[in-house]
Image (spheres, grey):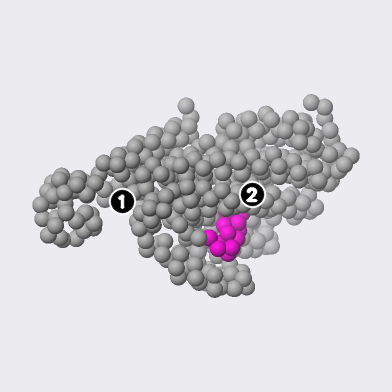
Amino acid sequence: MTERNTLARDILIALVLGILLGAAINQWWTPGTWSSIGVGDSTAFLAGKASEANADAGLVAASCRFIRNATQFTGDLFIRSLRFIAVPIVLFSLIAGVASLGDVRKLGRIGGKTLLVFLTTTVLAITVGLTLSNIVKPGTYVSAETKAELLATRAAEASSKTASGQAAAEAMSWWKQMLDLVPANPFEALAKGDMLQIVTLSMLLGLGLTLIPRARATPVIEACQALTDAVTSIVMILMRIAPIAVFALIAPVIATMGMDVLKALAVYAMVVIVALSLQLTVVYPTLLYFLTKSTNRITFTRFFRAQAPAQLLAFSSSSSAATLPVNLECVRHRLGVDDEVASFVLPLGATINMDGTALYQACVAVFLSQLYGIHLTLADQLAVMTTATLVSIGAAGIPGGSIVLMIVVLQAIRVPMEGIAIILGLDRLLDMCRTVVNITGDAATSAIVASSEGKLSNPQL
């Protein structure tokens, strides 16, 4: 078993154990249980406040409080570590990613078409995810009582978003929203962790590097790439303790919400899978049908027959990079894309074109906002679209990167980060599905660009 599969297994085991423990606490740990160990005011006791009602609390009660605090500390430390990683990973990887596109200018027309199709398919993928999530509302499949308890545990953060934060967003004009994308002080944006402003800063710095002599830009690009690798190494270390963190994060959630949350989780998973399926079987075939020339039009059957080997490998490996050689083979010899186009579009796509990942981030953001009872305004949904698009470009291909990307998107709309524990156990299955969409989007783009350039043949399979 590979290390990746072992980690996925360990996270799943930790999730199940956390759910079982949380459910047991939710079902059997009652005020009477506290009374039996000498605690009359559990809220004051857990907060470490003196109370006459807890005068009889002894070693057993103190041990329970220690375990509870240690569990909460472990989960909070993991979340804080992810927040620590989010800013540098976006900053350095986006600078390097955008700067490296300086070579695209040399390819002129092909490069421009490729980037335009990449952007179009990514925006369409996020739109599909947002639309389906808003229609089905998977995060609402919990009772009002359960949601009230969950909000009570996150009262300060939730009220900050739903009251003053939301009011400010609604009162802010569209022009002000757009203006605030540009940081007045980039160092302040970095210090505050304002992700949209950090993304803007990174892209502008990357663009600036493409406009200066390559000899001067190269050392900076290489430094950013090296720093990206360094931060990625930290992510890999964090992922080793992810099972412990998932257990520590999910147990309190289930203890508060009970098994009610699992119904919402099942609906959420189905929403993601259906959204990915729509992107795969409706969006791509439609674009191919209308954007390839009628003399050599790519039909639904032709496309999926050609791409089947690459899609199966992507599903089993969950790796766009590992699938790249097979995808190249399928696109060249089975789909009929000229080698010049395929050799440029597919490697670039494996780096910056992650439609499935962007769609997944949109679904996660809406699901968790609904679960926490946080209303997303139109501006918030546009922020999800913008952030998911840009960070899926800048931070693609990072081991454990889906978690980091989720943190970035959730921060942009101020949704509690702890919610990732709820969906992390399903990440492996959904990762397999979204990787298929990622590599299929690259293949579809290569066919569209090749057709526009007259470099698409029709090989007989």
Query: 89 or 170, which lies in front?
Result: 170
Q: Position of residue 377 (x, y in %)?
A: 55, 63
The local secondary structure at tag 1 comes to: helix
For the magenta stretch, what is the residue range? 376-395
Count of all numbered marks drawn on residues in the image: 2
| Residue 389 in magenta stretch | yes
Query: Disc 1 marks which residue?
Result: 73
Circle 2/circle 1 CB separation < 8 Å:
no
Q: Position of residue 389 (x, y in %)?
A: 61, 54
Residue at point 59%, 51% (across, down): 135
Structural crowding at the residue carrying mark 2, measured as other residues with C-alpha within 10 Å and reported as few (<14), some (14–19) or many (≥20): many
Vertical relation: 389 (above or below) 181:
above
Kindly give the residue lying farthest to the right in the view shown.
295
Q: Amino acid at mark 1?
A: Phe
Residue 128, label in figure: 2
Q: Amino acid at mark 2?
A: Val
Rendered-image quadrant of the C terminus: top right
Residue at point 76%, 36% (across, down): 300
Residue at point 79%, 36% (across, down): 299
Kindly give the residue lying farthest to the front in the view shown.
144
> Residue 183 lies in what quarter of the image?
bottom right
Pair 2/1: label in front: 2
Structural crowding at the residue carrying mark 1, measured as other residues with C-alpha within 10 Å and reported as few (<14), some (14–19) or many (≥20): some
The local secondary structure at tag 2 comes to: helix
| Residue 33 in magenta stretch | no
Whether residue 234 appears in this view of the structure is: no
> Is tag 2's residue or tag 1's residue first in the polypeptide sequence?
1
